[in-house]
């Protein structure tokens, strides 16, 4: 037997979550805010495109992704990596994670490096955590680094069959090679992730507007005017009593 829909249940099933635009006061259909927030995290601006806010979505997508890619380019693809090792904890990745799917390769690279293969899943250097002194890597990965990285030589590895053991500090090599661009790349990518957190909130709760602040300021000004009127009336009364 089919379940009969009551008017209340029909209204709840077609419930719309609406925000008010601070520009013209028009209603903005947020659709499913939770889904919009997830899409905004997955790809910056995608949640706004889902809600039909195409101009905002296109602007957020272009600005934030451009900022993130520019940071990666400045840092030679090495400034975004996930590492929770005691001697190399990359706390900046907490901010990088706000960019969504663009930061996922760093997690994949980190898991692959600490796995049984001891080598990255993708090209060496791209979002791969740096090698630490005493770290074991596969022979193929060690040969790739010796052939492609100008700062790593064959003498930087000890032979530990069936692996190679790194005997230097790759983070220091990156700082020496990139100089200030390593810090600039880190800053750009961190800002991109943090800005996208604001975009996620905007997709979930709608645009923010200073209506409450304006109401408070107008209320306070009215109270000040009332106090001035009371002061003037008290002064007039005192003057009248003195005249009498």
Image (cartoon, rainbow, N blue to C red):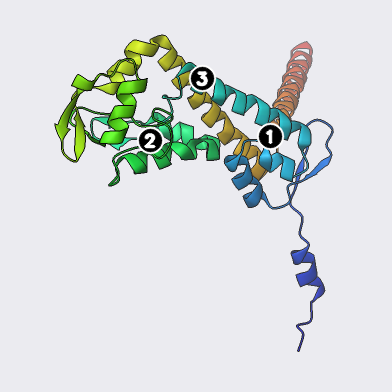
Query: How many residues crowd around disc 2 within 10 Å: few (fewer than 14), some, or many (20 or more)?
Result: many
**Residue at point 73%, 23% (across, down):** 221
Give the spatial CA distance, label 2 vs label 1: 33 Å
For the residue pair 108 and 199, the one nearer the viewer reads as 108
**The N terminus is located in which quarter?**
bottom right
Location of mark 1 (residue): 208
**The C terminus is located in which quarter?**
top right
* Vertical order, 204 against 197 (above or below): below
Residue 73's label in the rendered image is 3
For the residue pair 151 and 181, the one nearer the viewer reads as 151
Q: Quadrant of residue 66?
A: top right
Marks counted in the figure total 3
Location of mark 2 (residue): 82
Q: Marks 3 and 1: which is nearer the front?
A: 3
Task: State the SS at label 2.
Answer: loop
**Residue at point 67%, 30% (across, down):** 60
Q: Earlier in the sequence, mark 2 or mark 1?
A: 2
In the displayed orientation, state which residue is furthest to the bottom. Answer: 1
Task: State the SS at label 1.
Answer: loop
Q: Marks 2 and 1: which is nearer the front?
A: 2
* Vertical order, 65 against 13 (above or below): above
Task: State whether residue 168 appears in this view.
Answer: no
Give the spatial CA distance, label 2 vs label 3: 18 Å
Task: State the SS at label 3.
Answer: helix
Residue 102's label in the rendered image is none
Marks 2 & 1, CB-CB < 8 Å contact: no
Q: Marks 2 and 3: which is nearer the front?
A: 3
Marks 3 & 1, CB-CB < 8 Å contact: no
| Residue 41 locus on image (x, y percent) | 58, 41
**Residue at point 71%, 35% (across, down):** 57
Residue 25 left/right relative to 221: right
For the residue pair 230 and 195, the one nearer the viewer reads as 195
């Amino acid at each position: 037997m089919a379940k009969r829909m009551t008017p209340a249940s029909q209204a709840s099933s077609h419930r719309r979550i609406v925000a008010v635009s601070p520009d013209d006061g028009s209603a903005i259909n947020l659709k499913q805010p939770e889904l919009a927030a997830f899409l905004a995290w997955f790809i910056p601006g995608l949640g706004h495109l889902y809600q039909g806010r195409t101009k905002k979505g296109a602007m957020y997508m272009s600005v934030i992704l451009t900022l993130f890619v520019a940071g990666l380019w400045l840092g030679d693809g090495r400034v975004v990596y996930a590492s929770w090792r005691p001697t190399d904890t990359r706390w900046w990745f907490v901010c990088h994670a706000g960019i969504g799917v663009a930061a996922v390769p760093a997690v994949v690279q980190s898991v692959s490096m600490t796995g049984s293969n001891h080598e990255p899943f993708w090209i060496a250097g791209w979002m791969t955590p740096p090698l630490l002194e005493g770290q074991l890597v596969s022979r193929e990965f060690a040969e790739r680094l010796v052939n492609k990285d100008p700062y790593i030589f064959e003498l930087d590895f000890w032979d530990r069959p069936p692996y190679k053991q790194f005997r230097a500090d790759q983070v220091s090599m990156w700082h020496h090679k990139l100089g200030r661009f390593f810090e600039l790349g880190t800053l750009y990518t961190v800002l991109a992730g943090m800005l996208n957190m604001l975009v996620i909130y905007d997709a979930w709760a709608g645009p923010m507007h200073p209506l409450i602040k304006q109401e408070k300021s107008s209320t306070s000004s009215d109270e000040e005017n009332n106090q001035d009127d009371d002061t003037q009336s008290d002064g007039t009364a005192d003057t009248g009593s003195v005249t009498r």
